[in-house]
Amino acid sequence: MNQGFIVWEDEYRLGHEKIDSQHQQIIEMINDLYEARFYKKEQMVVSEVIERMCHYVTEHFQDEELLMAAIGYPDLEIHQSEHKFFIAKASQLCPRRGDGNVDIDDLMVFLKDWLLEHIAKTDHQYKPYLGKD
């Protein structure tokens, strides 16, 4: 697949190697989900991609929150509440293993819209506190 569902743009870059890499990995996983849906792969493949992504996003949120605490980001609690919202909403949309009752299109749109909004706006609010890596 050439472009994918989401294309990484330089404007998403925070300048922190680990966080930028994690954001790129999440985008890649959403693109994997898109590809699985687009090519009508088995539901099990779609479920595995979603499961892998949900685990990775939770790990990323933990890393990001630890980073924000370490740099003294004053709006950490607000940022954490956005992460909690995402996890709650995603868990409503994500199928349990073997459950085919998920609207993959709704899930992909939610992931794309929320993630890009979160990276481009919310994450960039702590960028000035990063200084140099």
Image: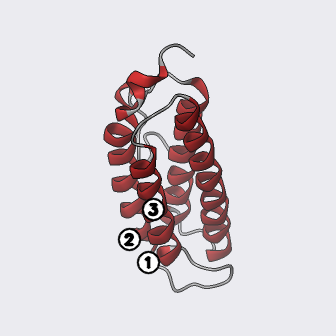
Q: What is the three-letter code of the residue carrying label 3?
A: Phe
Within the image, what quadrant is residue 49 found in?
bottom right
Q: What is the three-letter code of the residue carrying label 1?
A: Asp
Front residue (pair 95, 16):
16
Determine contact: label 2, label 1, CB under 8 Å. Answer: yes
The answer to which of marks 1 and 3 sits earlier in the sequence is: 3
The answer to which of marks 2 and 3 sits earlier in the sequence is: 3
Label placed on residue 103? 1
Percent position of residue 43, x then y: 62, 76
In this rendering, the label closer to the viewer, 2 or 3: 3
- Which residue position holds label 3? 86
- Residue shown at 48%/22% (left/top)? 130
Is label 3 in a helix, a strand or a loop?
A: helix
Is label 2 in a helix, a strand or a loop?
A: helix
- Which residue position holds label 2? 106
Distance, label 2 to label 3, CA atoms, is 14 Å
- Residue shown at 41%/45% (left/top)? 6
- Residue shown at 45%/34% (left/top)? 73
Q: What is the three-letter code of the residue carrying label 2?
A: Asp
In this rendering, the label closer to the viewer, 1 or 3: 3
Q: Would residue 5 be visible to someone looking at this image?
A: no
Distance, label 1 to label 3, CA atoms, is 17 Å
**Callout 2 crowding tier (Cα within 10 Å): few <14, some 14–19, many ≥20:** few
